[in-house]
Image: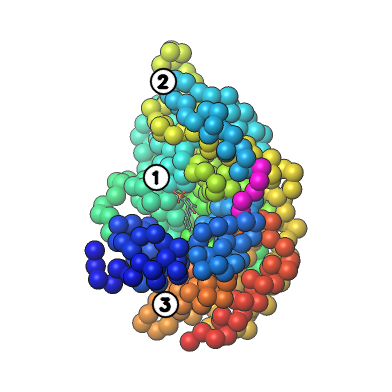
Amino acid sequence: MTETNILARDEIQEITGLTTNNLDAYWMPFTANRQFKKDPRLLVKAKDMHYTAADGRQILDGTAGLWCCNAGHGRQKIVEAVQKQVAELDYAPAFQMAHPKSFELAARLAALMPDPLNHVFYTNSGSESVETALKMALAYHKAKGEGSRTRLIGRERGYHGVNFGGISVGGMVANRKQFGAMLAGVDHIRHTHGIAGNEFSKGVPKNGIEYAEDLMRLIQLHDPSTIAAVIVEPVAGSAGVILPPEGYLKRLRDICDEHGILLIFDEVITGFGRLGTPFGVDYFDVIPDLVTTAKGLTSGVVPMGAVFASSKVYDAFMTGPEHLIELFHGYTYSAHPLACAAALATLDVYAEEELLTRGAKMAQYWQDALHSLRDCPNVIDIRNIGLIGAIELEPIAGEPTKRAFTAFLKAYEKNILIRTTGDTIAMSPPLVISESEIDVLVGTLRDVLKNLD
Ligand code: PXG
């Protein structure tokens, strides 16, 4: 234990509600551990649009937790479903066995997705969904007698979780550079951020469809017979909210079709209403072969992910003797009963309150509010789509990320929760946010930005 992380027990308890003075034991993910432990930011309760911090403050949730609590917090129906489930059936083996809710949920999810994305494979996170989809793509080509298609194509600045497949196809430098050589046989198309003329775009930017042709460059370089799949986020979230240029995703689809390459949409963020449509698939009217999801699937209440596979992909596996396992992949907790119960109740809430399309109704108000920050100091770009917003700040010379991180800390002091990545502030509130809560979020952020160095 280091000196700095031992605080007086009474002081800790009073300020944070902690019952230990050992903050060293917990190695926190994607966190500046030493900075955090000097001044912990602890949340102890959540209801609807607000967290309660340990010091009693109500914090307006501008990020739906980590882009996941789409129905807002503490929703009674979801809470009760999980409580009931844990008492009734805590766990059922997922291999060669099942429980009824796993089928009910898959059928309801498949009904939400356009044809032919009719099959659902369960995971426990977005990262696992990505690994699952990449493995499905490789195994699909093998099943079709095209085992030479082993290459996976991602995109610069893409985020596909943190497992080895995901960081290999991902393009966030910081997430890759600590971890060696990663998967072999991966390449990346160029990202679409910072294209001239797209600054302060409202919704999808006009310029840059030609960036899709970068896939042709890789196809020419590697030959299509070696390429299994292309994976992209319809809207990149973690890299700072990068929107696809108009027509870009359709063009990627066409190129993949021409060359027998599977297209995977990573909809871990864009899925479940974030764009104002159930999925990015609907928003962009482009149907990939595989779709990865997680987060909003259970509104963040129980960890769960799901991969949607097209009939073409699924059917390719459903051959051979019926007693044999078709795909040697799965997790102990695939289709966990608690997760299925949470997801079913979440889908009920989404349906009853029309949350999967509510983002479309709120998008104009959200857009106007965000773009009203244009004149704040250091703001160099603002981007928005559905209920996603990003404000990019000019980095402090020689100290990248510091300006945005300081904004995050000051915003938290002023009772709003935002996210930052690099020098971009990203927001993705629960889909239940009201106009007056948008005013509070953006008004507080204006205050923060005006008083930032
Ligand atoms: N794909 C995408 C597109 C994601 O955004 C994952 C995969 C991985 O999901 P899991 O469940 O394994 O974390 C993600 C996760 C942020 C932020 O603020 C984004 C994510 C997670 C945490 C924070 O940018 N995205």
The residue located at (31%, 61%) in the rendering is: 22
SS for tag 2? loop
**Residue that label 2 marks:** 325
Report how far apart the C-alphas of labels 3 and 2 lie in the structure: 51 Å
Going by the image, does 355 lie left or right of 91? Answer: right
* Residue at 35%, 50% in the rendered image: 168
Inspect the image, locate mark 2, and give the three-letter code of the amino acid beneath it: Ile
* Mark 1 to mark 2 CA distance (whole Å): 25 Å
- Residue 402 — which label? 3
Check disc 1 and report its element: helix, strand or loop. strand
Q: Position of residue 36 (x, y in %)?
A: 38, 68
Q: Quadrant of residue 341?
A: top right
* Tag in front: 1 or 2: 2
Is 75 magenta? The answer is yes
Residue occupying image coordinates x 26% and y 52%: 181
Q: Return the x and y of residue 354 as percentages of the image width and height.
A: 74, 48
> Which of the 4 quarters of the picture holds residue 138?
top left
Query: According to the image, label 1 marks what residue?
Result: 152
Question: In this view of the protein, which residue sits in the foreground, 405 or 162?
Answer: 405
Which residue of the protein is positioned furthest toward the front in this rendering?
Answer: 10
Tag 3 secondary structure? helix
The span shown in magenta is 73-77
